[in-house]
Image (cartoon, coloured by chain):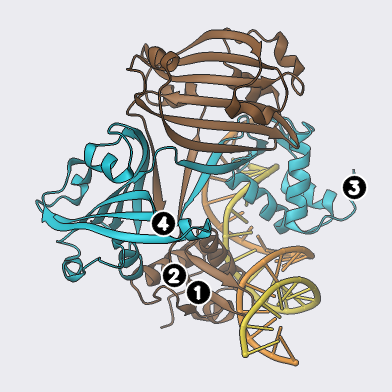
Chain colours: A brown, B cyan, C orange, D yellow
Amino acid sequence: MSQPQLNTWQSIQKEVLRRIHAREWPPGHTIPNEVELSKEFGCARATVNRALQALAETGVLERRRKAGTRVALRPVSRVTFEIPLIREEISNAGQSYEYRLLSRDQAPPANWASALGSTIALHIQSTHHADGQVYVVEDRWISTQTLPQAMSEPFETQSANEWLLANIPYTHGDINFAAMGAPDTIAELLNCPADSPVLVIERVTWDHDNALTAVRLYYTPGHRLESQIGA
Amino acid sequence: MSQPQLNTWQSIQKEVLRRIHAREWPPGHTIPNEVELSKEFGCARATVNRALQALAETGVLERRRKAGTRVALRPVSRVTFEIPLIREEISNAGQSYEYRLLSRDQAPPANWASALGSTIALHIQSTHHADGQVYVVEDRWISTQTLPQAMSEPFETQSANEWLLANIPYTHGDINFAAMGAPDTIAELLNCPADSPVLVIERVTWDHDNALTAVRLYYTPGHRLESQIGA
DNA sequence: GAGTGGTCTAGACCACGGT
DNA sequence: CCGTGGTCTAGACCACTCG
């Protein structure tokens, strides 16, 4: 019963996870409160609190004042993807990276970029290559209203993505993943038949209430986004 | 300089974010250390620590002992998806839910399910419906070695997913997202032409070193996974 | 109302990692 | 070496929410 002094929050977290995995504390079970656990483990309540709070953030535990701490009925699967710079994504994989600007003009934004809200925007199409092969096609719209300074950027050697990250602060964004048949022009660039199923990541970035940019990334067929689930 | 007493970690976090977004602390900038900030804000160091640690977890700050705390050069985009029970995903959207078992037999696992490692496994195919329309096709393999108790489950009214979550503990999993052309049998179920681009989520779940189950979810064409990015 | 988690404090010691 | 973040403690008060 009395543990041999667990006094780091990580060791407490580990022990709590062990009990959950071993079904000593099955799903739905209300576990002892912080004071009791701190007595059992021989540590301060704050240490137990740190451990349990971290587990609550990952969805393993559910905590409510007065009601106590319960083992989540459904260990909510929470998947986190890191979205790296494409250049890093490629060079981290040990491949050579190349960026090519395809077009740069101004036009009314595509429907999917309508969040930019203006009648005209800077439109930049480019490709990112890994070991000489096209890896992803970038189709980007930049608001000329909120980012007039983008008008004077060539985007010939530095991708819009990198320029934006380095120079434009943003507060939040929307992102979504979908499967799509590659449109003709994209398919040509990706060296695949038209309508090939490709993974598309669409992102809109904001600074407070101002939409800055909307981008679509068309990945080469077969591309996978991988991640881990921890319970 | 002296703030009007910021003494909750959330208010400190907010102020730090404000300075970052306002470029008072630009990317790469080393911010004052915890002791200095606690003096400026008029609070305990632990409170500052709590705020900065949370920001470091989200990738906004980078912290190293002795080196101090820097504003991340590239505010790492970290996207988190919650993977709900399909039933909840549908009923939360205000639609009626229906589950249908299509087949249940034993066979050698498909290639993508080879993590199960055995020569034979329980194979369950089913569909989940929203408002009478097929929403997702579930193609699942369950290890008969590690989960012999699954053999006696009919999975006729309760989906394998829900049975597993309710009864089988797991420690971790691999997950990946890809675009795929719908195979003939899947396309028929989804009421779409063969080879239609569909989003596929593939998941393998483990209990310590034992692979429990591998599942593929084929989403109806046009399905999107949506999330937010916070900077 | 009362029990539980949420948070703050002031102080202390430790561990890492630049210099 | 020694500055910085990482963590623990003991105690306190507060805020939520269940009954």
In the rendered view, would you say A104 is above or below A89?
above
Q: Nearer the viewer, mark 3 or mark 2?
A: 2
Which amino acid type corresponds to the residue marked 2 in the rendered image?
Answer: Leu
Contact between marks 1 and 2 (CB within 8 A): the answer is yes
Which image quarter holds the C terminus of chain B?
top right
Which structural element holds mark 3?
Answer: loop
Q: Quadrant of residue C18?
A: top right
Q: Chain of mark 1?
A: A
Figure quadrant of residue B228 = top right
Residue under mark 3: which chain is it in? B
Could you tell me residue B67's position as x and y percent? 63, 37
Q: Mark 3 and mark 2: span between their CA atoms?
A: 46 Å
Looking at the image, is mark 4 or mark 3 earlier in the sequence? 3
State the residue position of label 1.
A70
**Observer-nearest of A198 and B32:** A198
The answer for how far apart the CA atoms under marks 4 and 3 are is 51 Å
- Same-chain status of marks 4 and 3: yes
Foreground disc of the pair 3, 1 = 1
User: Please, what secondary structure does the residue beneath circle 1 have?
Assistant: strand
Name the residue tied to disc 3.
Answer: B2
| Rendering coords of residue A149 (x, y %) | 75, 15
| Disc 2 crowd, CA 10 A, few/some/many (<14, 14-19, 20+) | some
Residue that mark 4 sits on:
B86
Q: CA distance from mark 2 to mark 4?
A: 15 Å
Q: Nearer the viewer, residue A122 or B169?
A: A122
Q: Amino acid at mark 1?
A: Arg
Residue count near mark 3 (Cα–Cα under 10 Å), binned few <14, some 14–19, many ≥20: few
Is residue D19 positioned above or below A86 on the image? below
